[in-house]
Amino acid sequence: MTTARSDQFFAVDSVPLTHGSPVVTTGPRIPLYTEEFAADPHKIYREMRGRFGSLAPVELAPGVPATLVIGYHTAVRILHDPEHFPADPRVWQRDVPSDCPVLPMMEYRPNPLRTVGHDRLRYRSAAVAAVDGVDLHEMHTIIEKISISLINSFCADGYCDVVGQYASPLIFATLNAMLGCPPELGHRAAQGLAAMFDTVDAAAGNAAQADALLELARLKRVHPGDDITSRLVRHPVHLSDEEIRQQLALLYGAGTEPPQNLIANTLLLMLTDDRFAAHVLDGSLSTRDALDEVLFNDPPLANYCISYPRQPMLIDGIWLPAHQPVMISMSACNNDPAINTGALAHNRSHLAFSIGPHSCPARSVALLIVQDAIDQLLDAIPEMRLAVERAELRWRPGPFHRALVSLPVLFPAIPPIRSGGA
């Protein structure tokens, strides 16, 4: 009988069960998929912290239990300990129904997020090389062209929904350009991904996305270009079409919904918080300041970074059962009073892009896209204001994201603009 230790983590063999069973847990769980949770998750995080400390029992969908990590320091230790907290879900998903609404966001996939060891290194090396090949100067030009076209479609109306008319189509078009993806294939993939994030018709959305991305992988093997998909095809690890599809699915998951929602969440802060709203015109507080604050307080991917312990683990006085989801709440951890003092400007120690072996390799690209998108919109229409009371805005339910249904704004109508703002 042996006991393994990593900092404060204990694997179960002979440890006395003074804190309850390492296998069976009882008591109510907090649902993360409800309208109530979506409306005010921060209130529920605070209630969780008061009741449970750093680890809270939650449900990701009806009948799908998980442990939500809401303590910053506990999250950091877990994210740096893939040996005890691997991200491979294959044992867990054996008992999960195929129609489970969160399965497409959690199931095993041959990509760097859901594998361990040699496989993870192989997939991550290909993904990092493909993303590192993006020309950031060219991306700025692409975003400017796309944003001007979108702004011109509504600038004379004096009204737009930032989510539906600007952030979503801009991110969609930009990612398709980076991937070398024809619009029709990209549209199918994006629709499928939205269904997966919302956990509504998730299985059908997963299938639609899979078909579109496999078609893209095969297209680029025959007609390569200077794009992420072609770099995946050419990479020395020799990915199969199916493996390329899986890397593209991960890139679509990270590259559409989160940056789209980061644009909307940041603009909401800038339009409604006096520290930012009063200075949109004079520039005394920058877009990057607002981005840093949103990445701390309201990150677009609020709960994810899921692991599945190989054996029962004792952490912070709580037993975590083997092969059951342990999900990091980036939002709750960033707002942990132990580390969040309220001084967020230029503070980038948040977990919004994860840390450790699964940290996001596209962080710089994502921030460039989002900051450029916001600056292009505010440069063109600086007198923008929220069209409804903030309390009237609705948030999309779902356990993973922090996403507005819409962000309606009003502004003085302006004539169409040309490149360079003329």
Image (cartoon, helix red, strand yellow):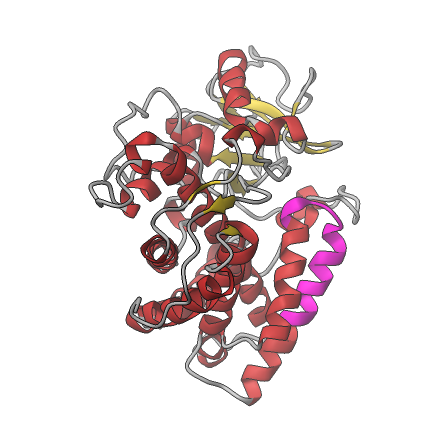
Vertical comparison of 169 with 58: above or below? below
Q: Is the residue 328 above or below the residue 22 in the image?
A: below
Q: Nearer the viewer, residue 383 or 419?
A: 383
| Residue bounds of the magenta highlight | 197-213
Q: Is residue 291 above or below residue 367?
A: above
Question: Residue sitting at 56 percent across and 37 percent down?
Answer: 309
Q: Position of residue 126 (x, y in %)?
A: 44, 69
Q: Is residue 22 left or right of residue 62?
A: left
Percent coordinates x, y for residue 239 in the rendering: 53, 74
Q: Is residue 278 magenta?
A: no
Residue 397, picture quadrant: top right
Is any atom of residue 212 visible in this view?
A: yes
Q: Is most of the magenta stretch helix, strand or loop?
A: helix
Residue occupying image coordinates x 23% and y 39%: 346
Q: Is residue 113 above or below residue 173?
A: above
Locate residue 289, reporting x and y percent.
Answer: 27, 41
- In which image quadrant can residue 373 be found? bottom left
User: Residue 200 in magenta?
Assistant: yes
Point out the image quarter for the N terminus: top right
Q: Position of residue 254 (x, y in %)?
A: 50, 55
